[in-house]
């Protein structure tokens, strides 16, 4: 890495953009164990004063600075078999961070990628803020600490090899985990693991590899767990086989957050085949049995009286009225022409592909939990408090999860498993049913967004946005108990939400004076930090108004955006999608192109889509589904500064595009009388095969900054907005309610009592 290759901004984790030499430690251990020592540095990204707070510091900067004091507690270990081990203090939920982390280690140590073993660390409260997975922060915050620890290990191995081979360190080379000296004498790093170890902790220095010598970082790689995943050998949280942990499910209330009043037939159900235990817990009645099928039978057989839920009687219409009453004013009407619009975004499910699940074994003096957790420190501290046990008596193992999208920031299943295990006195393997996830699980809050943009001639003078949302539960804080508690306080929650909102939103256009504010209301729902949190809705509203501004000023939507974007990276991704997507081509009536832009966390993105809104497409028959418009083509360009694994980034953006299509067109929950009508994935219309664009192209831009930016959530907002803009151009009417298909209910709602519907038996009838 040369100074000229670096931007005028600091590396994540380092104060100097050209810095490659770092301090670290060789720790006392039987085999070589190395760690980094990093000191927080103030962000220095904006060269001129700006009204945009995110140009000075954003949420990712805050999180990255918060983890640096504990960077030295994260270690790289060299083993005698020649492998390198690293316990990653983050959650792998399909985003590919175990692969990208292994790539960082392989790069700095010059070892084959297949010899790097990345596991997930148990909950470690001493890491404080350094074990939260969220806000697209993992690669940004670990990029330098992991590389420094690996570089220290490499240096120590070279010194040990120099003594072993009788050569100077400068005369040694490392390739594929083998150190070679003059005359061809060589030794494997495994043979040096013990010799390079230290009997005492000592401070050393290390120099990172320059960018121009990278052979792993920046090169597309398959996931290190790909083969295990496709052959069924990969172990997710639901696959763990913990001794005597029997299947357990919960009979839940018919309305959101109702509570058990009484159980009329507990003894009868307890006597059903396979059932071992029944216990009332805070969220319902837990049933433990020999199989999950027997659990389902027992849950369906229970006769429970329930207290009212926390949103009893509420509906989409009543919540919308509450939101409208809580909207903040846009201010005095401008003296110049303006565009003004109000948008509604309905509730959306935060269910992941893997059902919500956890295993727990609670004893009188200790507890052990296994779950996929993105905030495991908060989970451990909350569980210890619930059980009245010292923190040291609670062990929380972080398992790999089958998807999250923010869902696993919350540990609802782990808390239920702990309650059930304590009440039953036995280990439990607790799983939510799909109906539980849809009706009682975490949701993306319903929201409205009001926008006003004033202009004069071809110049936008001001932009004002007032976003009003059902309260977003941010009680995970930034990974530890104190910020988690602050986020739950009556005043602290809106303060925390507003801070989150302001540090995660930005204005990429030269729109004069701009202002964004958040207002929240209604705390009775189980909400969460669904992928990209506020950005999809906020950006979608903004980009639709941008299209209106383009029309008012007589400009093409693409060229209007290009003329007001504030930096070269932004223009480059917009130019790329316009070029590859053939922007402006002639299209049939009822079809159109849409384009949108979004930036966050040092990364920029643009999307171009084509949509078909012709009657023959909108009305095509789909069994138990709403067909509606179809996106026929999507082109997405992304610049994250430096993509550690371009193939992994491409996969992330593919998923983001599918999310954006779903949020714009089909995915929503329908609230009626205090509960959601959807009761499974067959009722909830995420982007299906019949709604996936036949043409999809992801373009990963060349490295521009030399350091990684955020990527995990980046593509959702621009994709959703581009679909909305395309729909508006195809129909001639700007959409204002999302998803566009929300008004059509295409299924017969399943009953709420019993809470779990019967398992389907007609699958073969629908095989094509």
Image: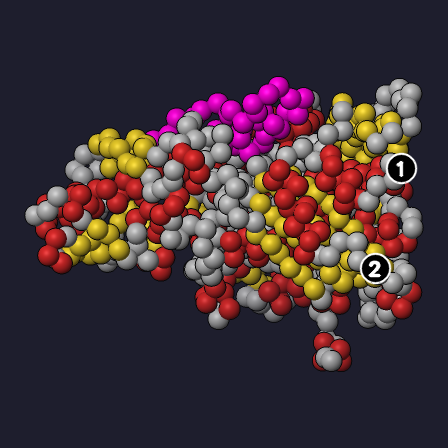
In the rendering, at what x and y percent does residue 649 appear?
55, 52
Is-magenta flag for residue 42?
yes
On whether residue 36 falls in the magenta region, the answer is: no
Query: Quarter holding the N terminus?
Result: top left
The local secondary structure at tag 1 comes to helix
Q: Residue furthest left?
A: 166
What label sits on residue 586 in the rendered view? 2
Q: Earlier in the sequence, mark 1 or mark 2?
A: 1
Residue for point 47% across, 40% down: 706
Q: Start and end of the magenta stretch?
A: 37-66
Q: Which residue is mark 1?
A: 552
**Residue 425, image x and y in percent?**
50, 50
The residue shown at (58%, 36%) is 601
Left or right relative to 511: residue 319: right
State the separation of the CA atoms marked 1 and 2.
Answer: 22 Å
Report x, y in % for residue 2.
38, 37
Residue 220 seen in this snapshot: yes
Query: In front of the other: label 1 or label 2?
Result: 2
Q: Residue at x 46, y 30 (%)?
A: 10
Res. 654 image quadrant: bottom right
């Amino acid at each position: 890495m040369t100074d000229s290759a670096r931007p005028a901004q600091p590396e994540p984790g380092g104060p100097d953009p050209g810095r490659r030499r770092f301090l670290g430690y060789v720790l006392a251990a039987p085999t070589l164990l190395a760690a980094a020592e990093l000191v927080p540095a103030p962000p220095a990204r904006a060269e001129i004063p700006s009204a945009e707070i995110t140009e000075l510091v954003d949420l990712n900067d805050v999180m990255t600075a918060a983890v640096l004091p504990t960077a030295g507690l994260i270690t790289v270990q060299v083993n005698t078999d020649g492998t390198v081990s690293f316990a990653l203090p983050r959650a792998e939920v399909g985003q590919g961070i175990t692969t990208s982390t292994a790539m960082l280690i392989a790069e700095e140590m010059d070892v084959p990628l297949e010899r790097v073993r990345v596991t997930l660390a148990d909950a470690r409260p001493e890491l404080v803020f350094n074990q939260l997975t969220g806000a697209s922060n993992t690669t940004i915050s670990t990029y330098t600490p992991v590389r420094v620890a690996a570089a220290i290990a490499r240096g120590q191995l070279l010194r040990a090899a120099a003594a072993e081979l009788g050569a100077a360190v400068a005369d040694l080379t490392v390739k594929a985990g083998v150190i070679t000296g003059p005359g061809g004498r060589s030794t494997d790093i495994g043979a040096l693991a013990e010799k390079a170890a230290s009997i005492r902790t000592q401070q050393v220095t290390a120099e990172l590899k320059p960018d121009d010598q990278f052979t792993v970082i920046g090169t597309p790689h398959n996931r290190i767990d790909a083969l295990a995943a496709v052959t069924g050998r990969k172990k997710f949280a639901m696959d763990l086989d913990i001794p005597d942990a029997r299947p357990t499910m919960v009979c839940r209330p018919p309305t959101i957050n109702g509570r058990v009043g009484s159980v009329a037939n507990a003894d009868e159900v307890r006597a059903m085949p396979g059932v071992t235990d029944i216990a009332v817990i805070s969220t319902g009645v837990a049933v433990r049995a020999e199989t999950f099928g027997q659990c389902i039978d027992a849950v369906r057989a229970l006769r429970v009286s329930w207290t009212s839920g926390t949103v009893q009687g509420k509906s989409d219409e009543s919540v919308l009225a509450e939101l409208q009453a809580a909207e903040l004013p846009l201010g005095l009407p401008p003296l110049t022409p303006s565009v003004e619009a109000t948008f509604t975004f309905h509730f959306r499910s935060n269910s992941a592909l893997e059902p919500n699940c956890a295993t727990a074994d609670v004893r009188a003096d200790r507890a052990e939990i296994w779950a996929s957790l993105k905030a495991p420190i908060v989970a451990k501290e909350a569980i210890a408090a619930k059980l009245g046990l010292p923190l040291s008596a609670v062990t929380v193992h972080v398992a790999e999860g089958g998807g999250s999208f923010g869902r696993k920031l919350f540990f609802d299943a782990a808390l239920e498993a702990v309650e059930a295990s304590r009440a039953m006195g036995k280990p439990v393997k607790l799983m939510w049913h799909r109906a539980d996830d849809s009706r009682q699980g975490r949701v993306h809050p319903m929201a409205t967004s009001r926008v006003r943009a004033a202009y004069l001639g071809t110049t936008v003078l001001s932009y004002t946005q007032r976003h009003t949302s059902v309260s977003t539960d941010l009680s995970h804080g930034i990974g530890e108990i104190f910020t988690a508690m602050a986020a739950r306080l009556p005043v602290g929650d809106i303060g925390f939400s507003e801070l989150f909102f302001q540090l995660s939103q930005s204005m990429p256009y030269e729109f004069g004076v701009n202002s964004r504010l958040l207002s929240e209301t209604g705390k009775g729902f189980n909400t969460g930090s669904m992928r990209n949190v506020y950005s999809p809705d906020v950006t979608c509203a903004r980009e639709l108004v941008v299209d209106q501004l383009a029309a008012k000023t007589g400009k093409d939507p693409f060229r209007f955006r290009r003329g007001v974007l504030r930096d070269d990276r932004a223009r480059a991704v917009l130019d790329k999608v316009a070029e590859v997507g053939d922007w402006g081509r002639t299209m049939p009536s009822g079809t159109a192109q849409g384009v949108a832009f979004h930036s966050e966390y040092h990364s920029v993105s643009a999307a171009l889509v084509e949509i078909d809104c012709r009657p023959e497409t909108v009305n095509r028959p789909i069994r138990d589904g709403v067909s509606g418009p179809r996106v026929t083509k999507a082109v997405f360009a992304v610049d994250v500064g430096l993509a550690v694994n371009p193939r992994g980034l491409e996969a992330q953006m593919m998923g983001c595009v599918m999310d954006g299509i779903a949020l714009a067109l089909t995915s929503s929950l329908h609230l009626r009388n205090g509960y959601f009508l959807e009761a499974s994935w067959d009722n909830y219309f995420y982007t299906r095969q019949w709604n996936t664009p036949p043409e999809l192209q992801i373009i990963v831009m060349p490295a521009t900054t030399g350091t990684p930016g955020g990527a995990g959530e980046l593509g959702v907002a621009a994709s959703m907005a581009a679909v909305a803009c395309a729909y508006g151009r195809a129909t001639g009417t700007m959409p204002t309610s999302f998803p566009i298909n929300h008004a059509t209910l295409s299924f017969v709602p399943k009953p709420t009592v019993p809470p779990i519907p019967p398992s389907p038996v007609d699958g073969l009838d629908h095989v094509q």
